């Protein structure tokens, strides 16, 4: 008997499903990924309610919302239910559609993150994709800077080699002009062929 | 001007060795060998690899180095001296070096581009570009940020080889820089490149050592290394593995380019060529092994990181489903959790629709070539702390590895041209600049949108089969056409005396391998290669922007025609040269480098004052009367050049 109950219970646990919020009652699922669910206590939930009210007021202040009464949303209008250990909850606002609520929260997401000291990866609201950080496109392509450095170094090396060669030829010319016999003068170069002496023996 | 007649020399032995090692040790040691090692039986692959090194690699390199050192000529001059029917062999080497040099420098240009992009944090291939603030570019999302950066931002690759895509300006810039660097390093021939190799040949080892220390201390490195070296002895019965080993060792040593012949032609005659061969071969193989350890330590790390990301994704799904707080399941407790809740690991995966994460599967996705360096390894570097520094080191290493291999390629063109006298009228510097300019113009093919596809075509058809053919003929030339006993006799005049066991053993080793074992092995590799080329369909992987992946396309007709032309350019000269020589002898009655018999008095005695010692040499120092025009002699005009044979007899005579 006990075993049967145990089995049924374990099946229930294994077969349990995650939290789903009722769209008919305009509920939006909010997940807060915390290691310790008790961190998001009643006070934080009250702050969250306040933030939702703030966001709705702000959103409906700038753009028109369908029931215009939303402009005056206050914390009493925000309802939190179905809290789970995850931590996840369902949030609903009186007379507010899911669409309006999602848009309002999306507009004020930075404030949500900041006030609750969370981030886009921790505070997840169903229906809102995390805004991605746009790439900062610099005015001057960053890779060109080291490239220009390398080009300059190469050009300097080329000039140095040319200058050295010109200097060497000048020196050799001077030496050849100054020496009277005009014998084979190879000491300037390092191309001394080691056996060249033998050729003259033949 | 006697300066140009005198052959340049290396400043010291180290320069020669470092140049040869730098030429042999190239990008293939880093991105081809580790993959071959892992996919062909792991630690067990070392057995066929080492056997092939001993019986194929070392003898071939020995032949090239001795021929160059003895005859003091590049590939063209040397083979003509061995036998005038072989004049085509040198021309083939020249063309192969020229063609390979063109596309090889493109890889250096890519390395330069990545290097210039590594001077920023975060690295540009870390994240995908964002579009509309909410989503990434589809191509990047479907593949990965590193693949996107490689295929789209670097190569700007087109969807097939037929679509050109235009010349990519950023690659044009790095290509110009790459050719400028090559030209500068070679501007004074080996006098300049010999100094540069002090850096380019040693720097890769410094970087490999740094990566080794960093790599083995990363988590997951031991998984990668175990995976790499796990010996699958049973695979050794597969002949494919042996052929793969011989192919690998052959291409690894940069043989048949003529570069090794050119380098050793600047050696003093009494340089210990046997020990040089052993040093270069052993260093090359040790470098390959070292690089494998580094690569697989880092790949093991990357596979572990990917595994952990995969598992963490699964954990999120599980946590969401079971409504458990964060941290309830960790990467370590993941397996036990699944077993507890679902009865088995795979049961849990099936029921919750999770992805099956596995480190081995990640490592199985073996990549080699440019994909390994520019995608996989670049991706792995992102996970290391201090990634820009590691990226800079890595791409600098690839740059130096490629640069000194380029020296060998260009020298393989320069030295023969100088030796046959084609470029005697011009200053050496202008010749170098000329070659670089021509190569640059043709290599513009490889920096258009479809450049990568063209590079693969050139690599397959210039950089493989022709090399095998040339190497085979080199061995046959020395072992059978010139006859190995004569060759040995010549060498014994200037090689170290065979008075100890080591030398005696080497003597018999060369006797066994050069004329007999190595040509047979090479023939087997060649036949296998031809067979493999025939059965593999003429297809290539083309990257599709819309899919974020490769699809297999067939080469169009004109590309196949071009590949045939490329292979022909690199091989047709061997039979052509023999035919030309035959025609000359039959119809014109004179010979280049005519053989003189004992006692025969020809112009040679009057001009040079010596006679041949009775060996059937091809006396290259024939008088000018035999051929017209001095400047195109394939051999040295006798008056200025010290004759290469019979030094001892001359000194005895006078």
Image (cartoon, helix red, strand yellow):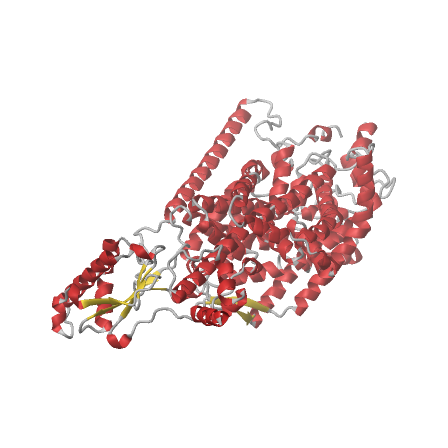
- Does B327 sit above or below residue B511? below
Residue B441 shows up from this direction: no
Of all residues, the one furthest to the front in this rendering is A1
Q: Is B567 on the left-hand or right-hand side of B315?
A: right
Residue at the (63%, 32%) spot, across then down:
B12
The quarter of the rendered structure image containing the N terminus of chain B is top right
Of all residues, the one furthest to the bottom in this rendering is A24
Residue at the (64%, 61%) spot, across then down:
B567
Residue B115, position in %: x, y?
A: 45, 48
Residue at the (22%, 61%) spot, across then down:
A108
Residue B292, position in %: x, y?
A: 60, 49
- Does B104 sit above or below residue B548? above
Which is more toward the observer, B274 or A9?
A9
Q: Is B158 on the left-hand or right-hand side of B525?
A: left
Residue B71 shows up from this direction: yes
Which is more toward the observer, A115 or B323?
B323
How many badges with numbers are in the image? 0
Q: Is B429 on the left-hand or right-hand side of B271?
A: left
Residue B315, position in %: x, y?
A: 44, 61
The quarter of the rendered structure image containing the C terminus of chain B is top right
Which is more toward the observer, B538 or B138?
B138
Q: Please tell me in which quadrant of the rendered image residue B489 appears.
A: top right
Which is more toward the observer, B625 or B181?
B181
Residue A97, position in %: x, y?
A: 21, 74
- Does B221 sit above or below residue A88? above
């Amino acid at each position: 008997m006990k075993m049967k109950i145990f089995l049924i219970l374990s099946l229930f646990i294994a077969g349990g499903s995650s939290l789903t919020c009722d769209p008919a009652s305009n509920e939006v699922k909010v997940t807060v990924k915390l290691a310790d669910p008790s961190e998001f206590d009643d006070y934080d939930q009250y702050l969250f309610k306040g933030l939702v009210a703030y966001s709705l007021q702000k959103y409906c202040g700038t753009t028109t919302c369908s029931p215009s009464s939303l402009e005056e949303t206050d914390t009493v209008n925000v309802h939190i239910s179905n809290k789970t250990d995850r931590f996840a909850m369902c949030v609903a606002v009186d007379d507010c559609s899911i669409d309006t609520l999602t848009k309002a929260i999306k507009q004020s997401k930075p404030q949500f993150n900041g006030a609750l000291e969370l981030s886009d990866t921790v505070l997840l609201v169903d229906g809102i994709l995390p805004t991605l950080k746009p790439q900062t496109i610099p005015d001057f392509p960053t890779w060109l800077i080291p490239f220009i450095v390398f080009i300059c170094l190469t050009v300097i090396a080329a000039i140095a080699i040319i200058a050295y060669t010109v200097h060497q030829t000048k020196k050799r010319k001077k030496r050849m002009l100054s020496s009277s016999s005009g014998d084979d003068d190879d000491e300037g170069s390092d191309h001394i062929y080691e056996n060249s002496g033998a050729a003259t023996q033949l | 001007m006697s300066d140009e007649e005198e052959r340049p020399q290396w400043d010291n032995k180290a320069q020669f060795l470092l140049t040869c090692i730098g030429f042999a040790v190239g990008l293939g040691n880093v991105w081809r060998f580790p993959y071959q090692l892992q996919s062909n039986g792991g630690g067990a692959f070392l057995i066929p690899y080492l056997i092939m090194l001993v019986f194929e690699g070392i003898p071939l390199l020995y032949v090239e180095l001795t021929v160059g050192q003895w005859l003091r000529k590049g590939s063209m001059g040397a083979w003509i001296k061995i036998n005038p029917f072989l004049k085509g062999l040198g021309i083939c080497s020249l063309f192969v070096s020229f063609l390979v040099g063109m596309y090889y420098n493109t890889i250096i240009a890519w390395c330069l581009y990545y290097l210039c992009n590594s001077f920023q944090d975060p690295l540009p291939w870390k994240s995908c570009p964002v579009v509309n603030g909410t989503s990434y570019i589809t191509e990047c999302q479907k593949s990965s940020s590193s693949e996107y950066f490689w295929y789209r931002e670097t190569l700007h690759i087109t969807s097939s080889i037929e679509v050109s895509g235009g010349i990519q300006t950023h690659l044009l810039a790095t290509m110009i820089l790459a050719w400028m660097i090559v030209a500068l390093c070679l501007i004074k021939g080996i006098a300049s490149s010999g100094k540069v190799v002090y850096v380019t040949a040693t720097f890769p080892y410094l970087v490999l050592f740094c990566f080794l220390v960093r790599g083995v201390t990363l988590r997951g490195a031991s998984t990668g290394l175990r995976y790499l070296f796990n010996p699958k002895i049973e695979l050794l019965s597969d002949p494919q593995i042996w052929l793969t080993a011989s192919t690998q060792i052959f291409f690894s040593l940069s043989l048949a380019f003529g570069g090794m012949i050119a380098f050793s032609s600047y050696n003093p005659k009494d340089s210990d060529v046997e020990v040089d061969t052993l040093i270069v071969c052993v260093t090359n193989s040790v470098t390959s092994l070292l690089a494998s350890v580094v690569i697989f330590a880092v790949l093991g790390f990357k596979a572990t990181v990917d595994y952990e990301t995969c598992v963490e994704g699964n954990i999120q799904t599980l946590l969401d489903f079971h409504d458990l707080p964060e941290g309830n399941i960790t990467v370590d407790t993941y397996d036990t959790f699944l077993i507890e809740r679902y009865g088995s690991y795979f049961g849990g995966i099936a029921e919750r629709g999770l992805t099956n994460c596995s480190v081995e599967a990640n490592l199985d996705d073996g990549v080699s070539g440019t994909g390994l360096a520019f995608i996989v390894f670049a991706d792995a570097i992102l996970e290391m702390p201090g990634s820009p520094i590691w990226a800079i080191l890595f791409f600098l290493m690839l740059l130096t590895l490629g640069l000194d291999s380029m020296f060998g390629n260009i020298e393989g063109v320069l030295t023969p041209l100088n030796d046959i006298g084609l470029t005697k009228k011009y200053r050496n510097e202008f010749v170098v600049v000329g070659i670089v300019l021509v190569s640059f113009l043709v290599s513009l093919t490889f920096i258009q949108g479809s450049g990568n596809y063209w590079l693969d075509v050139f690599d397959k058809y210039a950089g493989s089969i022709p090399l095998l053919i040339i190497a085979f003929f080199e061995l046959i030339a020395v072992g059978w056409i010139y006859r190995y006993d004569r060759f040995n006799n010549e060498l014994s005049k200037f090689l170290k005396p065979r008075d100890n066991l080591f030398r005696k053993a080497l003597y018999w080793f060369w006797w066994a391998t050069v004329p007999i074992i190595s040509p047979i092995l090479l023939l087997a590799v060649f036949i296998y290669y031809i067979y493999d080329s025939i059965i593999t369909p003429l297809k290539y992987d083309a990257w599709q922007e819309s899919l974020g992946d490769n699809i297999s396309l067939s080469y169009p007709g004109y590309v196949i025609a071009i590949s045939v032309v490329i292979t022909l350019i690199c091989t047709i000269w061997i039979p052509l040269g023999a035919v030309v020589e035959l025609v000359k002898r039959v119809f014109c009655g004179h010979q280049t480098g005519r053989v003189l018999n004992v006692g025969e008095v020809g112009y040679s005695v009057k001009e040079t004052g010596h006679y041949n010692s009775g060996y059937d040499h091809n006396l290259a120092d024939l008088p000018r009367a035999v051929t017209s025009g001095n400047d195109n002699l394939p051999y040295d005009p006798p008056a200025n050049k010290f004759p290469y044979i019979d030094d001892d007899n001359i000194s005895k005579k006078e």
